[in-house]
Image: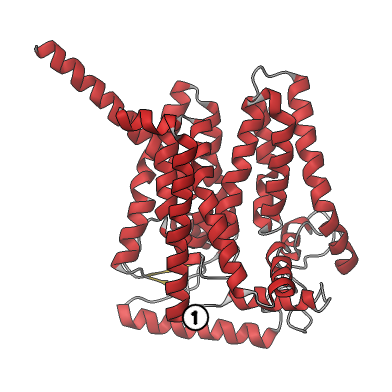
């Protein structure tokens, strides 16, 4: 009780202290990791560096001097180019960027938990954010994950505030649009949430046709205005309407234009692609021989079904293959333990949360809880079941799960106290 009163009284000071501690922890980890391993584990990082260098040279279309167009969202390449211009370096500035963003994530998680439920849900989520292993894993890299770790919950926070704070609705919709624009220009997959966030405006109280229409229209207009500059660039480059990156044309080509996803791939060169396929096949055979399992290629339906299960899977104690059947997967004991601690233990309570929210008519919590489900279907369809693709929405599973745990604990405590009174 005393701790609760102290936190309520000193909310902002405690959050600032936690933020500073998080910055220190992240900095120490990044310094130690980069000092020890340097760029040994980097793969996609070099793509972003090369894209940034091309932008500095004035080339906004070509990656690495060959025929492949820039296939990712522009945020990281443009930021990298800016860092090169300002600091003549891209690595250290990106590390600082990663550390600051993932540390800001912590107070954002607190406020998000507070808005959806209460302060009792916000504090555990913030503490979880300080130590979430996946954040540390990507801070010493030049990858999009650190940006996603902040801007997914930040967008969600502003959307929810636009629903609940009537007096500041327009301001929060503008902030939500800016945050969402940064998010989708980092990773185009998150554009799938654009219509989902429109549905949030049905939760406005009191709900009227006017309040919904005005809010939804503002959201749609602001987001499309912020997408316009890069959209114009894409039209000039590809001679067709391309939403964010050419990879989205795998879907939009069913309605208009050509499918540019294959030609815009890292492996559009057939010889390079075949080399990669051969390498993965040989690697799978070696892995299979080591653990006495046989790899086989999954059909599309089976691959998507397995990808859905793999997306939610909290551990890989037993060696197996994922994606299309040739990607080896086996985690160390430490990796499995970390996944259980920061994700797996919350999963059953997250599932229970759906029944609780339906019964208690907590519709805002229910809509938020559905987001990881949508995320899992999207990645199952694309057959991308890896942990890194789940980690940007793991905070929702933890938030729902920890809230249910606290609710169960509180009810158990009340029952216990009643029982003690009756015995007296």
In front of the other: 198 or 267: 198
Q: Is residue 134 visible?
A: no
| Vertical order, 419 against 118 (above or below) | above
Decide: few, some or many residues near mark 1? Use Cα within 10 Å; few <14, some 14-19, many ≥20. Answer: few
Secondary element at tag 1: loop
Instruction: Identify which residue is drawn at 51% across, 65% down.
Output: 139
Image quarter where the C terminus lies is top left
- Residue 58 position in % (x across, y down): 84, 76
Instruction: Identify which residue is drawn at 32% across, 69% down.
Output: 332
In front of the other: 99 or 239: 99
The quarter holding residue 193 reads top right
- Residue 39 position in % (x across, y down): 52, 80
Q: Is residue 149 visible?
A: yes
| Vertical order, 403 against 251 (above or below) | above
The quarter holding residue 21 reads bottom left
In this picture, residue 303 sits left or right of residue 133: right
- Residue 263 position in % (x across, y down): 75, 74
Residue that carries the numbered disc 1 in the rendered image? 38
Instruction: Identify which residue is drawn at 43% across, 66% down.
Output: 28
The chosen color scheme is: secondary structure
Count how many numbered circles sit on residues in the image: 1
- Residue 29 position in % (x across, y down): 43, 67
The quarter holding residue 379 reads bottom right
Image quarter where the N terminus lies is top left
| Vertical order, 380 against 280 (above or below) | above
In front of the other: 157 or 366: 157
Instruction: Identify which residue is drawn at 33% across, 35% down.
Output: 405
């Amino acid at each position: 009780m005393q701790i609760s009163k102290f936190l309520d009284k000193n909310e902002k000071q405690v959050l600032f202290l936690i933020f500073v501690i998080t910055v220190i922890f992240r900095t120490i980890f990044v310094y130690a990791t980069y000092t020890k391993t340097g760029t040994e584990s980097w793969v996609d990082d070099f793509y972003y560096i090369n894209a940034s260098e091309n932008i500095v040279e004035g080339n906004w279309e070509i990656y690495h001097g060959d025929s492949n167009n820039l296939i990712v969202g522009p945020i990281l390449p443009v930021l990298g180019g800016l860092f090169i211009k300002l600091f003549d370096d891209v690595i250290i500035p990106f590390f600082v960027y990663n550390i600051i963003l993932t540390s800001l994530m912590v107070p954002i998680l607190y406020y998000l938990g507070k808005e959806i439920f209460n302060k009792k849900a916000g504090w555990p989520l913030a503490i979880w954010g300080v130590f979430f292993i996946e954040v540390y894993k990507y801070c010493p890299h030049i990858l999009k994950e650190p940006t996603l770790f902040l801007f997914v919950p930040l967008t969600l926070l502003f959307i929810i505030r636009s629903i609940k704070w009537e007096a500041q609705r327009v301001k929060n919709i503008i902030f939500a649009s800016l945050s969402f624009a940064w998010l989708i220009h980092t990773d185009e997959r998150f554009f799938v949430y654009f219509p989902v966030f429109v549905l949030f405006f049905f939760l406005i109280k009191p709900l009227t046709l006017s309040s919904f229409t005005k809010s939804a229209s503002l959201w749609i207009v602001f987001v499309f205005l912020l997408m316009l500059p890069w959209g114009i660039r894409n039209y000039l480059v590809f001679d067709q309407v391309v939403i964010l990156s050419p990879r989205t044309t795998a879907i939009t080509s069913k309605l208009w234009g050509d499918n540019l996803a294959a030609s815009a791939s890292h492996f559009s060169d057939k010889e390079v692609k075949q080399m990669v396929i051969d390498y993965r096949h040989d690697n799978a055979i070696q892995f299979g021989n080591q653990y006495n399992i046989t790899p086989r290629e999954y059909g599309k339906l089976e691959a998507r079904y397995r990808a859905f299960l793999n997306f939610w899977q909290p551990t890989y104690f037993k060696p197996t293959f994922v994606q299309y059947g040739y990607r080896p997967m086996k985690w160390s004991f430490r990796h499995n333990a970390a996944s259980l601690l920061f994700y797996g233990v919350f999963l059953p309570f997250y599932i229970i949360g759906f029944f609780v929210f339906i019964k208690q008519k907590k519709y805002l919590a229910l809509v938020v809880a559905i987001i990881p489900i949508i995320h899992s279907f999207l990645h199952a369809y694309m057959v991308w079941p890896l942990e890194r693709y789940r980690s940007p929405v793991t905070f929702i599973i933890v938030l729902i799960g920890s809230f249910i745990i606290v609710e169960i604990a509180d009810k158990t405590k009340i029952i216990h106290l009643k029982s003690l009174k009756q015995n007296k």
